[in-house]
Amino acid sequence: MTVVSVSMPEELLERIDTFAEEHGYTGRSEVVREAARNLLGEFEDKRLEDRRLMAVVTVIFDYETTSVEERMMKLRHEYEGFVASNFHSHVGEHYCMELFVLEGQLEDISTFVGRIRATKDTLSVDYSVMPVDDFTAITARD
């Protein structure tokens, strides 16, 4: 197996080590391999290809990190034909939440989420994806 060197904050490394120990992993390499497989597989769901999708993306960041908010604004404008809605809210005393509602193809959603994840100083990026035609099936039954 090839050895890869990865830089990460000490706090994240400690969390990985604790997680590995608590969940019976052989070590941090096994945790990182599984996380990488999961990340790479997120947008490889064949059931979502060639379908119109809706996605909700939630980003949390420290409100004092203005570069994140500026980056979110740039992405919102760059993808304006794809971002159906955007919401900004303050969470607690030190954090902001940026919520994006997207409508488009899997490749577009994947690219958008990847660009957000690549934004330095985001604390959390979470999303969900659902085919829009699933809503049509639900309303047709009611």
Image (cartoon, helix red, strand yellow):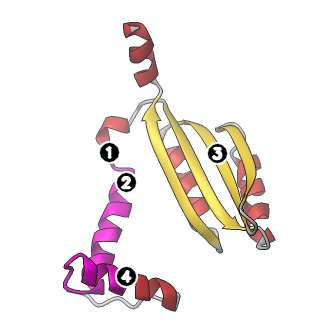
Q: CA distance from mark 3 to mark 1?
A: 21 Å
Image quadrant containing the C terminus:
top left
Q: Nearer the viewer, mark 3 or mark 2?
A: 3
Cα–Cα span, label 1 and label 2: 7 Å
> x, y percentage for residue 5?
39, 91
Give the extent of the magenta segment.
16-44
Disc number placed over residue 42 in the picture, else none: 2
Callout 4 amino acid:
Ile
> Considering depth in this image, is 63 or 9 the residue closer to the camera?
63
Tags 3 and 4 in contact by the CB under 8 Å rule?
no
Q: Residues within 10 Å of mark 2 (few under 14, many from 20)?
A: few
Residue 38 included in the magenta stretch of the image: yes
The Cα–Cα distance between marks 3 and 2, rounded to whole angstroms, is 18 Å
Residue behind mark 4: 16
Residue at horizontal 30 percent and vertical 85 percent from the top: 28
The kind of residue on which mark 3 rests is Phe
What residue is drawn where x is 47% and y is 26%?
132
Q: Disc 3 marks which residue?
A: 100
**Measuring 76% from the left and 73% from the top, which residue is drawn there?**
65
**Counting residues from the N terminus, which is met first, the one under dot 3 or under dot 4?**
4
Question: Is residue 86 shown in magenta?
Answer: no
- Separation (CA) of disc 4 from disc 1: 27 Å
Q: Earlier in the sequence, mark 3 or mark 2?
A: 2
